[in-house]
Amino acid sequence: MPPSLVPTTLQQTRYHSTWINVIPFPRVRDNLIRYEGRFDPWELMQDLVGELMSSTPAPRHRGTPVPATLPETGRPLSLLSASDTDEVTAGRKGLIVWGEPHEM
């Protein structure tokens, strides 16, 4: 197990939602556990992954296949947005961390 995913003391002693265990920053996991119930986890996920996740969970129907559609396009899809001309963010992807990385 990677050192960043080793459970903290708080994770081992306080009941919490299991999705918190996959966050790779121990201090962030502890903060999520401490403040669980004071934030909406769906809103947090929406903030972290944006439009990759629906804002409401899809209803599950037992025994039905998951629908999938493929986009029809005549040209390859570009991963970079032509409208992003900012020299700092253009062509970059990832999570923005406010503060010093060593303090996470």
Image (cartoon, helix red, strand yellow):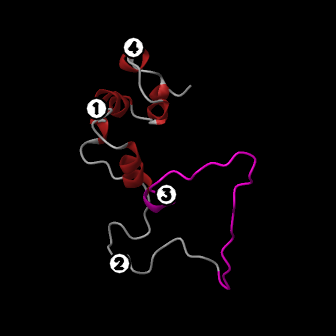
Q: Quadrant location of residue 74?
A: bottom right
Q: Earlier in the sequence, mark 3 or mark 4?
A: 4
> Measuring 50% from the left and 59% from the top, which residue is drawn there?
52
Marks 4 and 2: which is nearer the front? 4
Please say if the residues under marks 4 and 2 sit with CB atoms less than 8 Å apart: no
Look at the image and give the residue range highlighted in magenta.
50-75
Q: CA distance from mark 3 to mark 4?
A: 32 Å
Disc 1 is placed on an element classified as loop
In the displayed structure, would residue 5 be above or below residue 58? above
Q: Earlier in the sequence, mark 1 or mark 4?
A: 4
Q: CA distance from mark 3 to mark 2?
A: 28 Å
Q: CA distance from mark 4 to mark 2?
A: 48 Å
The residue at which mark 1 appears reads as 35
Q: Sort mark 4 into few (<14), some (14-19) or many (20+) by Cα contacts within 10 Å.
A: few
Please say if the residues under marks 3 and 2 sit with CB atoms less than 8 Å apart: no
Given the image, on which type of amino acid does mark 1 rest?
Tyr
> Measuring 31% from the left and 36% from the top, which residue is drawn there?
104
Most distant residue in the left direction = 99
Q: Which mark is residue 99?
A: none
Please say if the residues under marks 2 and 1 sit with CB atoms less than 8 Å apart: no
Given the image, on which type of amino acid does mark 3 rest?
Ser
Disc 4 is placed on an element classified as helix
Predominant secondary structure, magenta span: loop
Marks 2 and 1: which is nearer the front? 1
